[in-house]
Image (cartoon, rainbow, N blue to C red):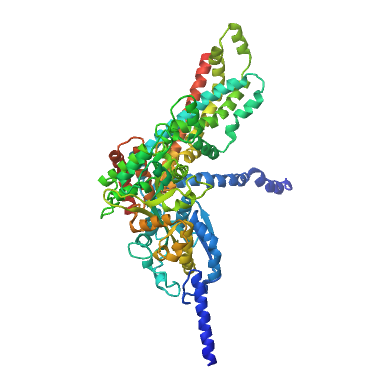
């Protein structure tokens, strides 16, 4: 006992009181997260509460920058443009991509090669694509109007008219990102078991019925993922719009992103720009939440209808 | 006797040296101590273009003259403006000398106090060659370079006048005379337009923001003034509506389709392809128009002043200058560089290459220099425009917002919107921005 006690006394603090040795390992990650995510965010919010213009002293103005937004027609219009642009550039690639996936899922000679060709637009740099499309959109010299003239249609103004600019930009976006949706849905199709199709065949279902009542429900989760990725991409789209129209003609294709860029880096109004960034972020979060909510509900109905 | 001889010889040598110096552009009488700052290193930030090229190409001469080393970089205009502003606002710019666009940045730079006052240097004979005097700069140049207290904050470098380019061949084919008034211009453009053939009477900037530089020329010719005595903006008054109607007529009835998205580049493409008969833009485009590799209208281009409007005839004027960052530690050396940049020799090179027009009358009006300008008709249009020059944009801080908002209004008139309504809407948005900027 007398001999053991000192040893036990020595060991006891080491065994019972463990210094929090895991903390040092968390620190690097914590520092990085604080420095590149938390700090910029906090600072953006702080800037948005100030009248902050490059070259002039800053003053605290509370929510004045946020109150400016509803009365700023350019901002309101930009929100509209963003929603329209996003909506169209989610829907069209989803529809076309699903169709392409169904086509490329069937077995036919040269399928691998054609699949490869089909996903090529995705690999190109958006700005380079934008420049090429700008040339194709040219009302006098562009190839698109030439093609229209071959089938007897009148020339269009494409990105040079406020009424057609957003659909034309969506065309580029769709052309580039349909392959991504196709790839995701193709993966989904590969995972579907063959039994339902066999029984449908026995029951004499038409091609459309097979697609509508078997394929579509089974690939819905994949469509959701594709939709989510497309939405995030489309809502923050900047390069294609900036390179082709810079938000024009006038401000007909100015999305929040482009307006935000102008406010912060051309008008040097960092306070107002930050406020727009905060609202833009909330909008993205809201849209993502809506998508997740829809997905959740969809799952319930699936299980419900299955039961 | 010997002493006299030696002194006479040294006098002769001195004269020869002065002569040599005057050849390099400095008719200095040995008063300016060019070598005083030898060994200093200067950083210069330039906007990409012929001015920057002209500086970089010949900078060795400056280093030989002064012993000052110069590091310079050319950045595309938009990015250069951004970079300069952000660095100057930080208080520790990485450059000593900055190339600035007066029509966009004058008020902003003045209000923020980013540029060093060089009025004192200009009066110092140890720093300034005798031929560099304020009165040598054109009125527009001084208006740009001086603040309201009359201090010189930069040296005016190159001026941009708006002129009318026209295709002589197309004019001859249709038997149309060169227009002297805006009404004649519209009539001529109508005659020259042949949509089936793909030929149009007029082309110009339709793109938002860029289009303001063209529109303001019409605005000035309609008798417009940008600001009232209190600094309020006036670009939605009757003159503005008249200008917008002219702009709308020209760009919708007699211009190529898609002009709403045209900047100078697309306009120039249409003109060099011989598809547009008239084009109003800055003076700097003669070299590409006369370049056989890039143009189909070489030798067929006429140059003249912008036709007269209902209330006057002006050439909308823009310009750039070169100034010294207030935070620079090498202001005197930087001043020597600025002085060299606007020197007679550098100015002559710029003019003769067609890459810009010096603000200095002694350069523009020097027959020796004029002799070596190949394109005499172009030179004449420049000289004539100088006489009717008027600043093409209001001198305010939020120039970019002004150009974007009013420019967008103009662009929407191209798809049929009513000029008065659009201008009113744009100014409702712009007025609070202007007030806020002046208040701060």
Give residue B330's position: percent from left, percent from top.
Answer: 49, 67
| Left/right of residue A64 with respect to residue B81 in the rendered view | left
Is residue B343 visible in the rendered image? The answer is no
Give residue A77's position: percent from left, percent from top.
Answer: 38, 36
Screen quadrant of the N terminus of chain A: top right
Give residue B397's position: percent from left, percent from top.
Answer: 36, 53
Q: Residue furthest bottom?
A: B1
- In the displayed structure, would residue B425 be above or below residue B299? above
- In the displayed structure, would residue A159 be above or below residue B380? above
Relative depth, front residue between B25 and A280: B25
Is residue B261 visible in the rendered image? The answer is yes
- In the displayed structure, would residue B391 be above or below residue B18? above
Q: Residue furthest right?
A: A3
Q: Residue furthest top?
A: A203
- In the displayed structure, would residue A72 be above or below residue A164? below
Relative depth, front residue between A39 and B40: B40
Name the residue: 56% across, 27% down.
A181
Give residue A5's position: percent from left, percent from top.
Answer: 70, 47
Name the residue: 56% across, 10% down.
A206
Relative depth, front residue between A221 and B6: B6
The answer to which quarter of the image holds residue B260 is top left
């Amino acid at each position: 006992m007398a001999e053991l006690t000192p040893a036990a006394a020595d060991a006891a603090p080491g065994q019972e009181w463990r210094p929090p040795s895991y903390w040092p390992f968390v620190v690097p990650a914590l520092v990085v997260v604080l420095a590149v995510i938390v700090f910029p965010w906090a600072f953006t919010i702080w800037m948005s509460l100030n009248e902050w213009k490059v070259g002039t002293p800053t003053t605290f103005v509370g929510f004045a920058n946020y109150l400016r937004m509803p009365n700023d027609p350019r901002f309101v219009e930009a929100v509209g443009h963003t929603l329209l642009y996003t909506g169209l550039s989610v829907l069209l690639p989803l529809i076309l991509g699903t169709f392409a996936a169904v086509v490329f899922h069937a077995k036919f000679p040269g399928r691998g090669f054609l699949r490869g060709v089909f996903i090529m637009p995705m690999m190109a740099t958006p700005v380079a694509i934008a420049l090429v499309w700008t040339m194709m959109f040219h009302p006098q010299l562009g190839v698109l109007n030439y093609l229209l003239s071959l089938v007897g249609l009148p020339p269009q103004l494409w990105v040079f008219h406020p009424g057609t600019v957003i659909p034309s930009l969506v065309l580029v976006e769709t052309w580039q990102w349909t392959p991504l949706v196709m790839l995701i849905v193709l993966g989904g199709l590969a995972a579907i078991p063959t039994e339902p199709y066999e029984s449908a065949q026995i029951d004499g279902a038409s091609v459309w019925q097979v697609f509508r009542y078997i394929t579509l429900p089974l690939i819905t989760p994949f469509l959701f993922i594709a939709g989510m990725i497309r939405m995030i991409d489309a809502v923050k789209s900047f390069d294609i719009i900036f390179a082709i129209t810079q938000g024009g003609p006038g401000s007909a294709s100015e999305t929040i992103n482009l307006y935000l860029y102008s406010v912060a880096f051309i008008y040097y109004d960092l306070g107002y720009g930050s406020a727009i960034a905060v609202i833009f972020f909330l909008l993205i979060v809201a849209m993502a939440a809506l998508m997740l909510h829809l997905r959740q509900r969809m799952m319930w109905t699936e299980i419900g209808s299955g039961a | 006797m010997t002493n006299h001889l030696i002194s006479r010889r040294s006098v002769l040598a001195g004269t020869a040296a002065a002569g040599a110096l005057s050849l390099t552009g400095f008719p200095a009488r040995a008063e300016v101590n060019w070598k005083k700052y030898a060994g200093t290193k200067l950083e210069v930030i330039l906007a990409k273009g012929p001015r920057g090229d002209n500086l970089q190409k010949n900078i060795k001469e400056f280093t030989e003259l002064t012993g000052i080393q110069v590091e310079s970089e050319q950045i595309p205009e938009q990015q250069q403006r951004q970079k300069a502003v952000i660095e100057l606002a930080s208080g520790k710019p990485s450059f000593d000398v900055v190339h600035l666009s007066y029509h966009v940045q004058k008020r902003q730079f003045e209000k923020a106090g980013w540029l060093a006052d060089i009025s004192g240097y200009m009066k110092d004979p140890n720093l300034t060659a005798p031929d560099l005097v304020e009165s040598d700069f054109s009125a527009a140049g001084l208006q740009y370079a001086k603040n309201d207290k009359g201090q010189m904050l930069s040296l005016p470098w190159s001026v941009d006048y708006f002129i009318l380019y026209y295709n002589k061949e197309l004019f001859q084919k249709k038997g149309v005379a060169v227009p002297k008034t805006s009404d004649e211009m519209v009539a001529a453009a109508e005659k020259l337009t042949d949509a089936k053939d793909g030929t149009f009477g007029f082309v110009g900037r339709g793109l938002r923001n860029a289009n303001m530089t063209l529109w303001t020329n019409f605005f000035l010719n309609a008798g417009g003034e940008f600001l009232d005595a209190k600094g309020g903006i006036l670009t939605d008054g009757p003159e503005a509506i008249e200008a917008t109607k002219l702009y709308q007529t020209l760009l919708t009835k007699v211009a190529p389709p898609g002009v709403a998205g045209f900047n100078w580049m697309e306009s120039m493409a249409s003109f060099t392809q011989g598809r547009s008969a008239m084009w109003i833009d800055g003076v700097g485009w003669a070299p590409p128009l006369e370049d056989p590799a890039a143009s189909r209208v070489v030798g067929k281009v006429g140059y003249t002043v912008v036709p007269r409007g209902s209330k006057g005839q002006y050439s909308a004027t823009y310009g750039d200058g070169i100034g010294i960052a207030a935070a620079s530690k090498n202001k005197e050396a930087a001043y020597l560089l600025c002085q060299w940049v606007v020197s007679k020799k550098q100015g002559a090179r710029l003019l003769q290459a067609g890459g810009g027009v010096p603000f200095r009358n002694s350069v523009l009006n020097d027959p020796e220099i004029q002799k070596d300008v190949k394109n005499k008709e172009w030179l004449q249009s420049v000289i004539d425009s100088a006489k009717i020059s008027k600043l093409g944009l209001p001198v305010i801080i939020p120039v970019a917002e002004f150009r974007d908002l009013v420019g967008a209004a103009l662009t929407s008139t191209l798809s049929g919107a009513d000029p008065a309504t659009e201008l009113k809407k744009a100014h409702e948005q712009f007025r609070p921005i202007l007030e806020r900027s002046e208040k701060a």
